[in-house]
Image (cartoon, helix red, strand yellow):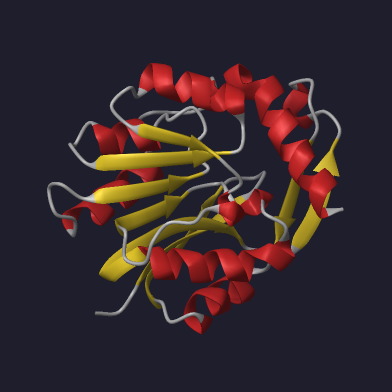
Amino acid sequence: MTGQHKRTVESGYDRMAEAYLSTKDPEDPTMLAALEDLARGLPSTAAILDLGCGAGIPVTRWLARRGYAVTGVDVSARQLELARRYVPEATFIKADMTDLAFGPETFDAVVALYAITHVPRAEQPALIADVFRWLKPGSAFLATWAVTGWEGEEDDWEGWGAAMRWSNHDLETNLGMLREVGFEVNSVETHGDEKETWLWAEARRPT
């Protein structure tokens, strides 16, 4: 199932890349507030990893325009074609985020917004351990998570003509994964609407 799960996510975002991008609000207040909070603790030349960067809007572009050295990772080739067009100053890698091999203490921050939800639940603890290892001591991990445990697939997500799959733990399990590998969870908020609610968490690798 894991292989099929990942192929569904990859092919889905390839097919719906433009439609998905059209839903992104560059002025989303929740996202901008979280990024502003993250930026306050960063050096001016920070190296930042954006996991599941998609087409680079708004997160990768927001970070790159502030002079940070941003590396975006996504499994979708079409998403990355758009990202290279809209954020030419960033570096992009096509990869499954669970297969990355960065060295220890490479990044000043890691961001994963609306991305870990597509990683099979069984692989999420190892991914979080990798993020912890990639971060420099004192650096932050900003991520969004589900608030209820659920796995499932839609054959035609939002009418965009492609299937998509999700795999989520519940809120306490997500926070527990962060703490289990050594993160200090500094900020926890939930935001949502009548359709869905997301956990926004900022965690830090201790100094």
Task: Please indicate, yes or no, whether residue 188 appears anywhere in the rendered image.
Answer: no
Task: Please indicate, yes or no, whether residue 39 appears anywhere in the rendered image.
Answer: yes
The C terminus: image quadrant? bottom left
Q: Position of residue 196 (x, y in %)?
A: 64, 48
Q: Is residue 128 above or below residue 95?
A: below
Residue at x-position 31% and y-position 57%: 107
Image check: 119 left or right of 185?
right
Q: Position of residue 37 (x, y in %)?
A: 25, 55
Q: Is residue 207 above or below residue 49?
A: below
Residue at x-position 56% and y-position 50%: 97
**Foreground residue among 104 and 71:** 104
Number of marks in the rendered image: 0
Image check: 105 left or right of 177?
left
**Foreground residue among 156 and 188:** 156
Q: Is residue 94 above or below residue 200?
A: above
Residue at x-position 38% and y-position 19%: 86
Q: Position of residue 202 (x, y in %)?
A: 38, 64
Image check: 170 left or right of 183?
right
Residue at x-position 51% and y-position 20%: 81
Q: Position of residue 184 (x, y in %)?
A: 37, 78
Image check: 173 left or right of 162?
left
Residue 145 figure quarter? bottom right
**Foreground residue among 194 and 23:** 23
Residue 16 figure quarter? top right
Q: Is residue 7 above or below residue 44?
A: above
